[in-house]
Amino acid sequence: MRAVLWLLALFGIASAIALFAGNNQGTVTVFWPPYRIDVSLNLALLIAVALFAFIHAVLGALAALFDLPRQAQRWRNQQKERSTYAFLLDGFAHLTAGRFIRARKSAESAIAQEQSLKDAGVKLAGAAQLRTIAHLLAAESAQALQDRAAREEHLRLALEDASTREAQETHEGALMRAARWSLQDREPEAALKWLKDMPQGAARRTLALRTRLKASRLAGLSAEALDTARLLAKHRAFSPEAAQSIVRGLAIDLLNGAYDTAQLMRAWQSLEPAERQMPEVAIHAAQRLAALGGDAQLAREWLLPVWERYATLGDSLKTRLAQALEESFESLDGVWLARIEAAQRANPRDGTLQYLAGMACMHRQLWGKAQQLLTQAALGLQDARMHRKAWRALAQLAEQRGEDAKAGEAWKRAASD
């Protein structure tokens, strides 16, 4: 459609020129003493147009001639710019291929080329980011080569180049890389310091949180590591099973860091309700409280949610729960005795419950019932420690009744385990 319109326009212009020139009787007289030149107006107009076109062409040629040095300089700068990016790409390629010396040299060449362009008055788009990335590439290569001095120097220069607002993302990346390098050098305190220098939004990114988690665990900061693991779990950085396992392990580490009952209480209160209901955490907390000489009643309160889910626990957790409860039997009350007896009656073939009920009855001085339950338990227990303690308890009960033969046999069975 456009071509048709142009064609119509050309026909119109040609028709207008033909009408004007065909009936134009005017003349132009040029006096050049002693001559007089008469030409038609049409010819004068053609000569004027041709002269204008010639002068325009001459001026364009002269401008192009005088612009050749600038064009040559521009071409050289373009070549340098292309070589700068080529060096940077080569550096990344060498780094991924494990050629760290070549990667470092390529990165340094890119920095040198960019500096030469800067000295020539040419400013590349994103020059600060380019320099920062090149310095980080060189620092990464130096880290792989264990050249710490070169790494620190390139890192310093990268942070200086990334201090502008347009290079904010690369500045955050430089801080994150610095934290990971410190973690690789087994310097968790330095890694945490780099992470604290990051903006709040960047510090909550998954990669930063993963680095913080590793650094906190390596530094033994269980509380901070636990908070970080919670954030990662909310961000779904781990599978639900992995998140639960990590949080469980960190909660146990936090409890292990308590060296008196007051510290243990603060650590327990700092846990979230879902964490306090984890069987492994609650059992470990109760055992830790018993080891520190804490209130046995409080330990049983911590164990109550786990006890209510006894049927869903595995064999190892059932054994650990029984051992944790046994450590608080010195002050066992009637409520807990009733709970244990009810559970044992509901599961009469469960050796662990038989043992637990028997030991509870023994501490409550219910000798006959204790002997009956412990005898049944001794025949079905799989845990060696509980099996040995059951026979020892039976030996003590036999000695109380003066049955030396039965006591000797029980002591012998306990010793054989």
Image (spheres, rainbow, N blue to C red):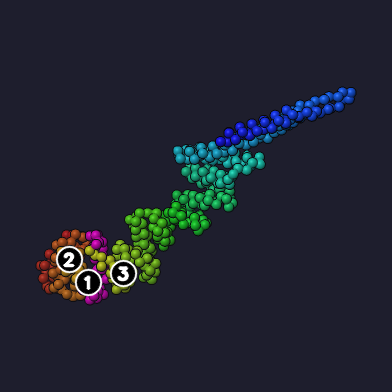
Residue highlighted by disc 2 = 347
Q: Which residues are magenta?
A: 312-339
Q: Is residue 408 left or right of residue 132?
A: left
Q: Are marks 2 and 3 in contact (CB under 8 Å)?
A: no
Q: Quadrant of the N terminus?
A: top right
User: Could you say which is closer to the camera, residue 113 or residue 75?
Assistant: 75
Q: Is residue 393 visible?
A: no
In 3D space, how far apart are the residues under numbered discs 1 and 2 (Cα atoms)?
A: 12 Å
Residue 315 is inside the magenta segment: yes
Q: Is residue 49 left or right of residue 75?
A: right
Residue type of the residue flagged with mark 3 = Trp
Q: Which of pointers 2 and 3 indicates the residue nearer the eye?
A: 2
In 3D space, how far apart are the residues under numbered discs 1 and 3 (Cα atoms)?
A: 15 Å
Sooner in the amino-acid sequence: mark 1 or mark 2: 1
Q: Main secondary structure of the magenta part?
A: helix
Residue highlighted by disc 3 = 302
Residue highlighted by disc 1 = 339
Residue 332: image location, x then y, percent? 24, 74
Badge 3 marks a residue whose secondary structure is helix
Tell me if residue 79 comes above or below residue 162 in the rendering. above
Give the residue at the far top of this rendering: 35
Q: Residues within 10 Å of mark 3 (few under 14, many from 20)?
A: many
Q: Residues within 10 Å of mark 2 (few under 14, many from 20)?
A: some
Sooner in the amino-acid sequence: mark 2 or mark 3: 3
Residue type of the residue flagged with mark 1 = Arg
Residue 309: image location, x then y, percent? 25, 65
Sooner in the amino-acid sequence: mark 1 or mark 3: 3
User: Could you say which is closer to the camera, residue 281 or residue 120?
Assistant: 120
